Image (cartoon, helix red, strand yellow):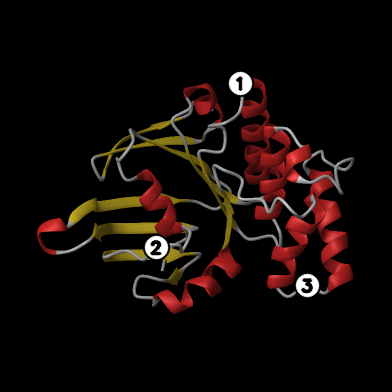
Amino acid sequence: MSDYAINVRNVTKVYGDGDNAFLALKGVDFAVSPGEFVMLSGPSGSGKTTLLSILGCVLTATSGHIELLTEDISRVKEAHLPRLRREYIGFVFQAHNLIASLDATQNIELLLRMRGFGRAEATAEAHRLLHAVGLGDKLESRPGDLSGGQRQRVAIARALAGSPPIILADEPTAALDAQNGLAVTELLLRLAKDHGHTVVVVTHDSRIFHLADRIVHIEDGLIAREEKRAS
């Protein structure tokens, strides 16, 4: 067991088999401490989104050792991945993945109900989360009525539903201008520093690199190097 929130050792991921097999991760070592804000960067096809998906219990690794908050999930079966996601993970998707027919409150309520909240409790918690991300005046707004930055903040509020200890974000600033991208990243940083969430962001957006505790560069399925931000 380790003191890391995320501890990955010699992880591989193979897609396909036989002559069509593709080795996306080639023995990755990656660890993140509780409350740390880490960015994963690398070119398209480098393996960064595959690694994030494994950390988020969306995919299983082909081989290697993986711990989330000291629980060994290395050999967990796919049927058990939803439980791990519910217990440990809040995921912020690049494309928001909000349900267009539901308003901001309802998008968050839906996940809270899946995590065992009663109806009234889910509504109150959804409102609290939306206020926390600066959208207290948008509780009944549907995604189509929100700006890109506002939709991303709803997605972050939804990722926080039930207070999962690990927040993962896949290119959260890709569709945002510089101002909104910075605001969204600063919000993720505050989650790590003020509330103790462990945050890992996949990004190639150099405009936000200065906010990370560490920037880990992945190339061709391997960790190539990392940079630690000066304190």
Q: Amino acid at mark 3?
A: Phe
Q: Amino acid at mark 1?
A: Ala
| Marking on residue 203 | none
Q: Amino acid at mark 2?
A: Leu
Percent from the top left, x then y, of residue 34? 55, 53
Q: Is residue 221 left or right of residue 115?
A: left
1 or 2: tag closer to the N-terminus = 2
Percent from the top left, x then y, of residue 13? 27, 58
Q: Which residue is mark 2?
A: 59
- The C terminus lies in which quarter of the figure? top right
CA neighbours of label 1 inside 10 A, class few (<14), some (14 to 19), many (20+): few
Q: Residue at x 35, y 70 (%)?
A: 74
1 or 3: tag closer to the N-terminus = 3
CA neighbours of label 3 inside 10 A, class few (<14), some (14 to 19), many (20+): some
3 or 2: tag closer to the N-terminus = 2
Mark 3 residue element:
loop
Q: What's the CA distance linking mark 3 and mark 2?
A: 26 Å
Mark 1 residue element:
helix
Q: Which residue is mark 3?
A: 117
